[in-house]
Amino acid sequence: MGADLLNEVEGVVQGHRDGHGFVIRDDGQPDLYLAPQEMRAVLHRDRVKARIVRMDRKGRPEARIVEIIERKKAPIIGRLLHESGVWLVAPEDKRYGQDILVPKNATANAAAGQVVAIELTEPASLYSQPVGRVTEVLGEIDDPGMEIEIAVRKYEVPHRFEPETLAQAASLPDKLRAADLKHRIDLRDVPLVTIDGEDARDFDDAVYCEPVATGRSKTPNAWRLIVAIADVSHYVKPGDPLDEDAYERATSVYFPRRVIPMLPEKLSNGLCSLNPNEDRLAMVCDMVVASNGSIDAYQFYPAVICSHARFTYTEVAAILTNTRGPEAARRKQLVPHLLDLNEVYRALLKERARRGAVDFETTETQIICDENGRIEKIVPRVRTEAHKLIEEAMLAANVCAADFIAQAKHPSLFRVHEGPTPEKTTLLQNYLKALGLGLGVSDEPSPGEFQSIAEATRDRPDAMQIHTMLLRSMQQAIYTAANNGHFGLAYGAYTHFTSPIRRYPDLLVHRVIKALLLGKRYNLLNAPVKNPAPQRRKAAAKPNAKPAQLTAEGEMWEAAGAHCSANERRADEASRDVEAWLKCRFMREHLGEEYSGTVTAATNFGLFVTLDELYVEGLVHITELGGEYFRFDEARQELRGERSGVRYGVGTRVRVQVSRVDLDGRKIDFRMVRDPEEDAVMARVRRDRNASAVADLAAVKEEDRVIKAATKKRGRAAKSGAAHPVRAAKSTARKAAGKSGKGGKRR
C-alpha cells in the first residue's frame, strides 16, 4: 500500500454518524478514511476524487478530498426545526453529518417538527453549512406509514409511476382477447394450482405434476412437472413507458402492510396475476423428472392456462400431513395432484443432496402490524414442506432456463453466487480449527464441504453459531452476464425465470427464451438500459486472471445486471430500515424490561443479542459486560473475559435488559443482567480462588521462614558434615504444606 501514497482515486463519499467518513472506491480496493474536517466540505453520497495522504496506526489509508466531481441531487429527508430564530433541517439519515440551513421564505409553510424533503441550493464548504429549500412536506413523524414515506425517499425508491406508464396500463384490456391466444398451447384443462402465502396478492407461478412412463417402462417411473409463469413480456414491450418504469425500479419493494410494485396494479394484481378460475397467458417450463431427481428432458413454450385453485402454504402442508383431514376434504379432486407434487419434490431433494447444495435451517420473522401501522407482534415464519415443495419446483424451472440459454450461447442475465473469497475462507478455516471439530474446508471449498459441516453439526448445542459462520463466509448473489454458477445451490448455471411480475431480470430472461423459440435473438440495445456509474464490486477473480473483453452488447447486459443487483440491495436496505424503525418504536414501550436472548454476533465492541420472545436484535456494548477487560478472539468469534475466563460467542444464552432506544439511529441497546444462580456460582469460584491464593501465600511464607532459620545453622552443619540444612528445610516445608492439602507452588 505504500506505493499507493499520493495516488488519486475516484469514489463515492459514505458519511458516518460520528462525523468522519469514507471514500468507497470505484475500483473495489479498501475504503479511504476521511477525517471530520474533510467531511465538512462534502456530503454523504457525493462523488469525489481523493488523494491518499497517510496510513493510520492500523495500516488503513487516509485521504484528502482533491475534487468534488458530482454533488448528489436527490432530496434529503429530515425534520424541520426552529432554533433561536433559525430554520434548519436535521437529516433523518445521520450519515449526512450536518444540519441544513433553510431561509425563512423557503420552508413551504411547513411547521416545526414536521418531516420534509429538502433540496440543496448552496453546497457545504469548509467554512459554511449547506443551505436548502423545502420541496415537499410529508407530515408529522407519528403519522401512520411515515416510516415508509421516509424510506422510499431516503433510498430513492421510485414510488410513483409516470403518467405515460399509467396511461399505457389503463389502455390494456381487462380480459384476454382472441388475438392473445394465437400460437399458444392451450393448457386450460390442466389442473394447475397456485401455492403462496396467506398475504400474497400477485401470483407469478402455477404448478402441476403427474406420473409418466419413460423409456421402455410400461408403468410410471418418472414425473411430468409443469411450472407455468405469468407471461409479463406479452404486455410489457421493450422501450414502452411500462418497460422504462419497470427497469428503473428493477424489483418490487416489500414493507409491512405495503408493497411498492414494479408494475402498475392492473398488471401485477390483474392481467398478469394467475388468479384462480381466470384465463391467463403464461410461459411454461414442461419437465420430465426421473425418480432420482434428475431432469431428463424439458421444453419451453407460450401457453394459456386457467388456475384451478389458489392454495396457501398452510393449507397444502395440512393436506400433505393428513389426507383425510378437513382441508383435504374441501379439495378432494386436487389432492391426488398435490400428492404427485410431493413425490416429485422428494425426488428433487435426492438430486439436491447428490450435488451437495447448501441447506441451512434459519429463522425468518414476520411483523404483524395493527391498524395504525405499529407493530402488534413479531412471529417466526414457519417453513413447511409446502414452502420447500414450491421452492424446489421453481429451482428446477430456473435451472432449465439457464441451461436453455447457455446451450444457445445467447447473452442474458445469470444469477451468480460465487464461492467464499480467500480472506473469508481463511477466517472460516481458523474458526473451525479453533473449535476442534475435526472438520474443515479446503482453500477452494465446494458447496458439498459446507453442507457436510452443516449436517455433521446439526445436533450440536453450538450448531447455530457454526451455521451462522458458514453463512457469513459466503458472498452475496448478483445478476451478471457472466455465467459463473451458483455456489450455494451447487448449480453450474442458474438464472431467475419464475417471478417476472416483481423482478426485471426474470422479464429479460423471458424475452430471451421467447426469441430463441422463434429462432431469433433478443437485442438488449433496444431496451432502456443505460451504462451506470461505476459500481463498487469486490474483486473475487483469481490472481492474474485477465478480464474478458466484452462486446457492446455484452457491456449492456453487464450494465443491466449491475443495475438490477444495485436496486435489489436498495430494496433490501429500505425494507430493513423500515423494519428497524418499527422495532425501535415497538421497543420504546419495553424500556427497562428484561428478556432472555441469544448472542447472534460477537465483535470487538460488544455483542448483538436477539430476544427470544420478541425476535428483536440489540447491542450489548462491551462496557456493559462487567468490570473486567474482554478480548475479542477473531478465530473463535467470541469475547473472553481475561480475569474470569467468561466467554460470549454466537449461540450463547444470556439475559438482558432494554436500556436505550435510538429511533433516529435505528439502534437498540441492552444491558447484561446476571442470573442470581450464575452470580452465586461465580462468587463461589472467586471465594475458592481467593482461599487458594491465601493458602499458597501462607505456605510460601512458612517455607521462607524455615529456610531463613536453617541458614543460620549452615556454618555449624557444614563443619559437622551434617545434611545440607537448606535442602532439609525445603523438604520439611513442602511436607508441611502437603499435609495442609493446599500445595506450596507459586502461581
Image (cartoon, rainbow, N blue to C red):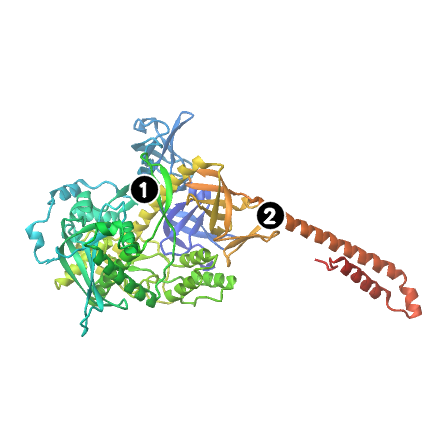
Is 33 or 376 nearer to us in this picture? 376
Q: Where is residue 249 in the image (x, y as percent from the top left)?
A: 25, 47
Is 218 or 732 nearer to us in this picture? 218
Q: Residue at x 93, y 65 (%)?
A: 716
Work out how far the residue at label 2 is from the one at label 1, CA to CA, in angstroms.
42 Å
Per the image, label 1 sits on a secondary structure element best described as loop
Identity of the amino acid at label 1? Answer: Pro
Q: Say which label, 2 or 1, has the lower sequence index.
A: 1
User: Is residue 481 in view?
Assistant: no
User: Which residue ends up furthest to the bottom in the rendered image?
Assistant: 216
What crowding class fits label 1: few (fewer than 14 Cα within 10 Å), some (14-19), or many (20 or more)? some
Residue 614, labelled with which disc?
A: none
Quadrant in the picture for residue 416: bottom left
Per the image, label 2 sits on a secondary structure element best described as loop
Is 112 or 291 nearer to us in this picture? 291
Labels in figure, total? 2
From the image, tell me which residue sits under label 1.
Answer: 256
Q: Quadrant of the C terminus?
A: bottom right
From the image, tell me which residue sits under label 2.
Answer: 628
Q: In this view, does 633 lie to the left or right of 740?
A: left
Identity of the amino acid at label 2? Answer: Glu
User: Is residue 633 in view?
Assistant: yes
Q: Is residue 13 left or right of residue 394?
A: right
What crowding class fits label 2: few (fewer than 14 Cα within 10 Å), some (14-19), or many (20 or more)? few
Is 553 or 374 nearer to us in this picture? 374
Q: Position of residue 46 (x, y in %)?
A: 35, 45
Q: Is residue 491 above or below residue 667?
A: below
Indicate which label's residue lies in the foreground, 2 or 1: 1
Q: Position of residue 7 (x, y in %)?
A: 41, 55
Q: Position of residue 500 (x, y in %)?
A: 22, 52
Q: In this view, does 616 lie to the left or right of 207?
A: right
Quadrant in the picture for residue 411: bottom left
